[in-house]
Image: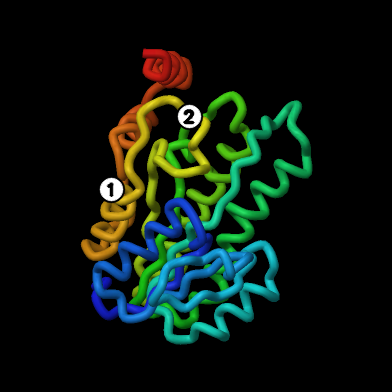
Amino acid sequence: MQINGAHVLVTGANRGLGRQFVLSLLDRGAGKVYATARRPDLIDVPGVIPLRLDITDPASVTAAAAAAPDVKIVINNAGIATGANLVTGDLDAIRREMDTHFYGTLNVVRAFAPQLADGAILNVLSAISWLAFDGAGAYHAAKAAEWALTNSVRLELAGQGTLVTGLHLGAADTDMMAWYDGDKTAPEAIVAAALDGIEAHRSEVLADAWSRQVKAWLSEDPSVIYREAGAALTA
């Protein structure tokens, strides 16, 4: 799977990692880039095809698939972070997280899958797919569900030769993480690792040290994981 010459669609392309995906795809010689957002007027990268797409709206997703019938790589990047916990958080916010990360991603996969034979899907996940944080209970649950979705879709689409890659990362230096004072990885580095992973036909990309550490903790007892995670965050 080569980026050079490929026709690619990126969701949530107006800012953050999505915008960086668009820039890096162009740098790597993508033949066509559909840059999508709920408000395509906010897309400011020249040389792309802006396209309206609200991944939580099935009609919008269907229309986008019809408008981009030549896409062979789909990058599911669109996401939100409400800061809601599960026990005391606002239920509408929790549902928005799940509607976006799980059902929204699934809407896009289902709409584009028929045209992705021998193509690729990249789902932007998170180290928080595997690790809960106070203040991000809804995000953790939704990203964990998206991780499970990624694994299931990989099996379901294997017969048509579609590569399905999960991208895990810690904190990226984007506006969504502007509040975070810890170490953050440059978006260019995250996206480079992701696109290299697609070209290398990898099922999973661990884009930074934090995602690699959290993945390594998964074999531990939860009491160990959360003790070590707490120590790492306060170091």
Residue drawn 70% across and 49% down? Answer: 96
- Residue at the image point whose x is 49% and y is 37% from the top: 177
Residue 28 % position (x, y): 24, 69
Location of residue 6 in the rendering, given as x and y in whole percent from the top left corner: 31, 78
**Does residue 1 appear in the picture of this structure?**
no
**Residue depicted at 57% across the width and 85% down the height:** 66
Specify the quadrant of the image occupied by residue 37.
Answer: bottom right
Q: Residue 189 carries which label?
A: 1
Residue closer to the observer: 43 or 147 = 43
| Quadrant in which the N terminus appears | bottom left
The quarter of the rendered structure image containing the C terminus is top left
Q: What kind of element bears circle 2?
A: loop
Badge 2 density bin: few <14, some 14–19, many ≥20, Cα 10 Å: few
Q: Distance between the residues labelled 2 and 1?
A: 18 Å
Q: Is residue 143 left or right of residue 30?
A: right
* Three-letter amino acid code at the position of disc 2: Tyr
Q: Read off the residue under disc 2.
A: 180
80 displayed left or right of 169: right
Q: Quadrant of residue 225?
A: top left
Q: In this view, does 114 lie above or below 78?
A: below
